Image: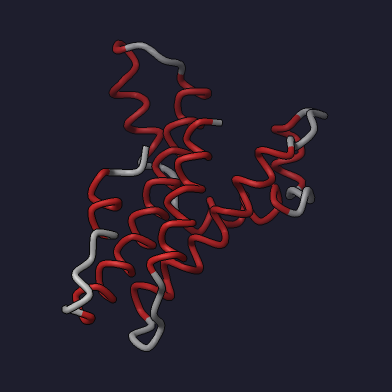
């Protein structure tokens, strides 16, 4: 689930617009990192397996992921046109609608996080942030 702090960031004081703007940007950034963490945790669990005896190994696998490589894989999955290497891993399995949607969301959120963190002119509305929070919660349920 998306950290509670993201929802708390939406409880903005309209009398403090600069704080509100910064809080909304943090919501976007937090949502991206929550989705990245979910994806790498799911992949590590699929590769290594579950259980407390494999927790350390899962941690090592998780640390091998980079944001750039995750974005590359997600772009291919979102377009249903994975790289040759990823086609081999799929071994003939189809990319589900849910996976394509999650991959597309990851790519969009990565761009949004970059905008939120580095574009000081860009601003977000409370409604935009709420939509992102709602969608990330849906993704976590899939």
Q: Is residue 87 above or below residue 67?
A: above
Q: Is residue 122 left or right of residue 94?
A: left
Horizontal and vertical percent for residue 10?
A: 29, 60
* Residue 43 place in picture, x, y as percent: 51, 32
Quadrant position of the C terminus in the picture = top right
Q: Residue at x 52, y 23 (%)?
A: 46
- Residue 99 position by quadrant: top right
106 up-or-down from 141: above or below: below
Whole-percent x, y for residue 120 in the image? 33, 85
Q: How far from the left and from the top, in percent, is residue 97? A: 73, 39
56 or 16, which lies in front?
16
Instruction: Name above or below for residue 45 compared with residue 75.
Output: above
Q: Nearer the viewer, residue 15 or 47?
A: 15
Residue furthest to the bottom in view is 121
Q: Residue at x 39, y 62 (%)?
A: 28
Q: Residue at x 53, y 51 (%)?
A: 70
- Left or right: residue 18 versus residue 112 is left
């Amino acid at each position: 689930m998306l950290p509670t702090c993201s929802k708390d960031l939406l409880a903005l004081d309209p009398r403090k617009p600069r704080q509100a703007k910064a809080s909304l940007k943090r919501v976007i950034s937090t949502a991206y990192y929550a989705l990245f963490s979910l994806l790498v945790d799911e992949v590590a669990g699929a590769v290594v397996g579950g259980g407390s005896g494999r927790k350390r190994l899962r941690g090592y696998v998780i640390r091998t992921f980079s944001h750039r490589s995750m974005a590359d894989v997600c772009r291919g999955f979102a377009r249903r046109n994975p790289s040759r290497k990823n086609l081999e891993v799929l071994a003939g399995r189809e990319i589900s609608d849910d996976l394509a949607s999650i991959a597309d969301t990851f790519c969009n959120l990565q761009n949004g996080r970059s905008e939120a963190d580095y574009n000081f002119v860009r601003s977000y509305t409370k409604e935009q942030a709420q939509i992102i929070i709602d969608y990330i919660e849906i993704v976590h349920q899939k």
